[in-house]
Amino acid sequence: MWLVRCGHSEAYVKTSQTCPDCGVKKKKTLAERWHSCPCCCEKHRNVASAQVNLN
């Protein structure tokens, strides 16, 4: 989870629960290490989280 500041507002982004391809958020437990989305995005959870941070 990252704190993103945009001007005067702040928002927490749950990067490990957000799809880097389509932006859909899916609740995951800490034990789930694989990101799988209906948009056919399949990646390790850490890779998907890093890609969300870069977008």
Image (cartoon, rainbow, N blue to C red):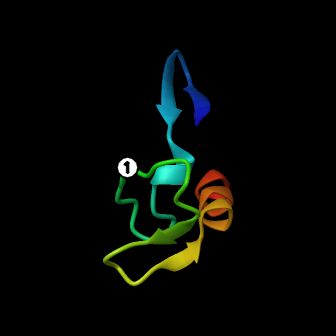
Residue at image point 50% right, 42% down: 14
User: Is residue 48 shown above or below 27?
Assistant: below
| 37 relative position to 6: left or right | left
Q: Residue furthest top?
A: 8
Q: Residue furthest left?
A: 38
* Residue 41 x %, y %: 46, 79
The one nearer the camera, 11 or 33, is: 33
The one nearer the camera, 41 or 22, is: 41
* Residue 52 x %, y %: 58, 57
Q: Amino acid at mark 1?
A: Lys
User: Is residue 26 shown above or below 36?
Assistant: above
Q: Residues within 10 Å of mark 1 (few under 14, many from 20)?
A: few
Q: Which residue is mark 1?
A: 27
Quadrant containing the C terminus in the rendered view = bottom right
Q: Secondary structure at mark 1?
A: loop
User: Is residue 9 shown above or below 24?
Assistant: above
Residue at image point 46% right, 55% down: 18
* Residue 1 x %, y %: 58, 37
The one nearer the camera, 23 or 42, is: 42
Give the mark count: 1
Residue 44's quadrant in the figure?
Answer: bottom right
Residue 43's quadrant in the figure?
Answer: bottom right
Residue at image point 64% right, 51% down: 53
Residue at image point 67% right, 66% down: 47
Q: Residue furthest front?
A: 31
Residue 51's quadrant in the figure?
Answer: bottom right
